C-alpha cells in the first residue's frame, strides 16, 4: 500500500480502530449471539445479517491496521506562505477565470466532491510548495494540461475530515 499519511491521519485511524474494537465489536458479537438463539441458522436472515456486519467490522479493523503499518509518514508542516498539506487554497483557472477553493489532503481523505483534493492528484502535486500569485501548470496526462493562478492560501488546522471508508 505505502500510502502517505500525516500524523493526524494515523491518529484518526487509531481512534477509529479503538472505537470499532471497544464499541462496534461487542455489539456485533452480541447481535450474532442473539440471532443464533433464534433457531435454524440455514434460514435465519438475522443471523446472516449479523455475521455480515461483524465480518465487515473486522475487515475494516484489519484494513486500517495494515494502512498504519505500511504508511509512509509525511509532515503536515509547510512555510506560512506556501501551499502544503491541510492548507485551503483558492485558485483561478487561467483559461476561463473561474475560481475554486480546495483543501490539500492526503489520499485517504481526498474527496473532490467536497473540495478535498489529494496531494498526489495532478492539481495537488502542482500546487504543493507554491506561493500566492504563482501561476502553476497542471499536467493531467501527456496530452492535457491547464494553468491555475494561486489567489490565496489559508493555513487551516486539521478539522477532522473523515478517513475514507472502502
Image: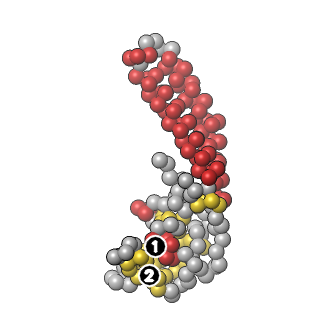
The front one of 97 and 74 is 74
The front one of 119 and 70 is 70
The answer to the question of whether label 2 and label 1 lie on touching residues, with beta carbons closer than 8 A, is no
Task: Please give the residue where the numbered disc 1 appears in the rendered image.
Answer: 123
42 horizontally vs 67: left or right: left
Residue lying at 56% horizontally and 71% vertically, measured from the top left? 87
Residue 112: assigned label: none
Q: Quadrant of residue 78?
A: bottom right
Residue lying at 57% horizontally and 30% vertically, measured from the top left? 27
Is residue 94 positioned above or below 111 on the image? below
Q: Callout 2: helix, strand or loop?
A: strand
Tally of marks: 2
Number of residues whose C-alpha sits closer than 10 Å to that of mark 1, classed few (under 14), some (14–19) or many (20 or more)? many
As drawn, the residue found furthest toward the front would be 142
Number of residues whose C-alpha sits closer than 10 Å to that of mark 2, classed few (under 14), some (14–19) or many (20 or more)? some
Name the colouring of the figure.
secondary structure
Pinpoint residue 142: horizontal percent, then vertical percent: 37, 75
Residue lying at 57% horizontally and 26% vertically, measured from the top left? 29
Pinpoint residue 132: horizontal percent, then vertical percent: 53, 84
Q: Quadrant of residue 41?
A: top left
Inspect this view and state whether residue 10 appears: yes
- Looking at the image, tell me whether mark 2 or mark 1 is earlier in sequence order: 1
Task: Give the Cα separation between the discs numbered 2 and 1.
Answer: 9 Å
Pinpoint residue 94: horizontal percent, then vertical percent: 38, 84
Inspect this view and state whether residue 99 appears: no
Pinpoint residue 36: horizontal percent, then vertical percent: 50, 17
Q: Callout 1: helix, strand or loop?
A: helix
Task: Please give the residue where the numbered disc 2 appears in the rendered image.
Answer: 137
Is residue 58 positioned above or below 101 on the image? above
Amino acid at each position: 500500500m505505502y500510502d502517505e499519511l500525516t500524523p493526524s491521519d494515523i491518529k484518526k485511524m487509531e481512534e477509529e480502530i479503538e472505537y470499532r474494537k471497544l464499541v462496534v465489536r461487542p455489539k456485533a458479537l452480541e447481535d450474532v449471539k442473539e440471532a443464533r438463539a433464534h433457531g435454524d441458522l440455514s434460514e435465519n436472515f438475522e443471523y446472516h445479517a449479523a455475521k455480515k456486519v461483524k465480518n465487515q467490522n473486522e475487515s475494516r479493523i484489519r484494513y486500517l491496521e495494515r494502512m498504519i503499518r505500511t504508511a509512509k509518514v509525511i509532515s503536515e508542516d509547510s512555510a506560512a506562505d506556501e501551499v502544503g498539506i491541510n492548507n485551503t487554497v483558492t485558485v483561478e483557472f487561467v483559461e476561463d477565470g473561474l475560481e475554486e477553493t480546495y483543501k490539500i489532503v492526503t489520499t485517504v481523505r481526498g474527496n473532490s466532491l467536497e473540495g478535498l483534493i489529494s496531494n498526489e492528484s495532478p492539481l495537488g502535486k502542482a500546487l504543493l510548495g507554491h506561493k500566492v500569485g504563482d501561476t502553476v501548470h497542471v499536467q493531467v496526462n501527456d496530452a492535457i494540461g491547464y494553468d491555475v493562478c494561486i489567489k490565496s492560501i489559508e493555513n487551516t488546522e486539521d478539522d477532522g475530515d473523515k478517513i475514507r471508508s472502502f
